Image (tube, rainbow, N blue to C red):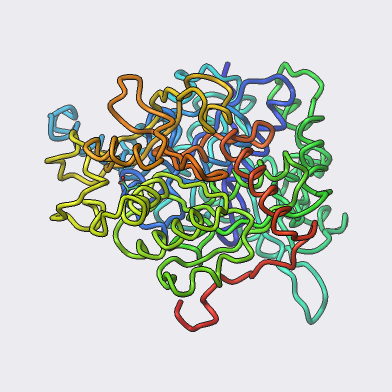
Amino acid sequence: MTRYIFCTGGVVSSLGKGVTAASVGRILKARGLSVVIQKLDPYINVDPGTMSPYQHGEVYVLEDGTETDLDLGHYERFTDVNLFRHANVTTGQIYAEIITRERRGDFLGGTVQVIPHITDEIKRRIHLMAQSSGADVVIVEIGGTVGDIESLPFLEAIRQMRKDVGVDNTCYIHLTLLPYIRATDELKTKPTQHSVRELRSIGIHPDVLICRADYTITPDLLDKIALFGDVDREAVIPLETSDTIYDVPLTLEEAGLGEYLVRRLRLDAEPPDLDDWRDLVTRLRNPEGDVRIALVGKYVGLHDAYLSVHEALLHAAASHGLRLVVDWIDSEHLDEQDVAVHLAQADGIVVPGGFGERGIEGKIATARYAREQEVPYLGLCLGLQVMVIEFARHVLGDEQANSAEFMPDTTHPVIDLMLDQKGVTDKGGTMRLGAYPCVLQEGTKSRQAYGVDEVSERHRHRYEINNAYREILANKGMVWSGRSPSGHLVEIGEIGDHPWMIGSQFHPEFKTRPNRPHPLFVEFIRAAVEHRAKEGRGASCPEADVAPRLASKGLM
Ligand code: GLN
């Protein structure tokens, strides 16, 4: 019998519900249980693939090419379980399905309503997650905050789930905030009480309350919350803000949540083994030095837009025993003249993925700086494409070289639209998406980093290296170190006579795990450390700018 744990959030958004759900997954997995996590998102978009990073942060891509909410990245990183398309459900998908059925005549003249038709479809998706995964425990996170109009059908569906599958097989976890009042120097429980009351008014009685706070939560507050919330005292779990999100599973475990869930859901569990996780947190907290990486993108004011890239760098730095310091640099206001000023302190440079022309010339200037100054460079998807454009312009001498994405009528399309993308007009879910194999060239840095001949990596792109340019670029020193098995498509390019300058058409950042950092990131950080030593920089560096670079110029 599958057990279901439902996670809702109250009081305010951005409490870390995704990290909390992921952490619950980790502490259960640590007990030998199989766990999957599903996110129900109340917005009407079918998936986040068409949403701006400003709205939504990064789009996380699964093995099967599903474009999902960034919380799925937390789920996969924390549980180390690959998820598939059923793992992210949106209101858009639910309504699209019901309206298609209605048009087909499936409802035989009946009135189609939120209850039961929409709620039944939501429950069908939850059961599908359980059946397709066969997991012992399905954790379901409901996006948004209790009280939002748009999440009501999802809450009603999970309320019904308890009736459908039984009290013993369901557990409701509610995450709330205890705000701090400076004048009286205290944390307040009233918003939590209200939030629980709101949940109860729609028929959900939470079993567990996880209370977030920026200050120490004293036991008397927990007693009070248990009393007013009508929740077992041991199921009121304090979760104070930590220096690292990877500490959350350990905090929840120490507070007894794992034991409580096992008992509550009558799970057949082994004693928890979180040793490797503890080692990870210890490593993160006790670095032996710093590594400073410049991340040059156009959404740098919003770190969520590059969440997986940041985590991949963090995992790789921790594997070297180093603290990661990131300079977030806005490519839009970067040019050949001032690029050196902004990148001078970087031990390594990352140009992440992106779409559209804005900020491109700054990224090309960045690639030029990295190549000429021999600074380690990792290009991710668009980061490979700008690296190739730069090489074509300044090494091959083709000043007009460009991508058809930025200049559709260019006569020098060193980056061109993929053949099977021609004629595609729909924007949603139509890119080259998900895992594809990549064969690595013997004797290259990429092959050395991976240590194997073939890998599988996740993609999200429409453009590619134009094969018409492959040979002339190779003759000038560009090495095509990774290709599709047919050889037709470039997957990785590296600069032959550079210490470490590699770009991939795929997104390795989606496959990094805290205890299995991605080999390309591990090697990139190693190269960055060497560069740091060569530059004579000490073990530690001054704090990186908190605000993105260039903001001070009033340009943001
Ligand atoms: N815009 C580029 C393309 O579509 C790169 C995409 C990306 O970086 N994910 O090919």
Q: Is residue 355 above or below residue 327?
A: above
Where is residue 467 shown, x and y percent of the image?
24, 35
Q: In the displayed image of the protein, which residue is found farthest to the right?
A: 219
- Looking at the picture, how far across and down is residue 257, in whole percent? 76, 37
43 sits to left or right of 100: right
**Above or below, 283 relative to 411:** above
Relative placement, left or right, of 60 versus 162 is left
Could you say which is closer to the camera, residue 526 or residue 372?
372
Question: Which residue is found at the position 11% from the left and 41% from the top?
Answer: 423
Out of 438 and 428, give the one closest to the viewer. Answer: 438
Relative to 98, 25 lies left or right: right
Q: Quadrant of residue 459?
A: top left
State the image coordinates of residue 15 (x, y, percent, origin top left).
Answer: 62, 56
Which residue is at 57% across, 28% downward? 448
Q: Residue at x 70, y 65 (%)?
A: 190
Residue at image point 13% right, 55% down: 409
Name the residue nearer the viewer: 488 or 556.
488
Of the 4 image quadrants, the one containing the N terminus is top right
Question: Could one spot residue 472 in this view of the protein?
Answer: yes
Relative to 80, residue 539 above or below: below
Q: Residue 150 at x, y = what percent?
A: 39, 53
On screen, 168 above or below 395? above
* Residue 124 visible in the shown view: no
Number of numbered tags placed on the structure image = 0
Q: Quadrant of residue 46?
A: top left
Say which of 285 and 123 sits in front: 285
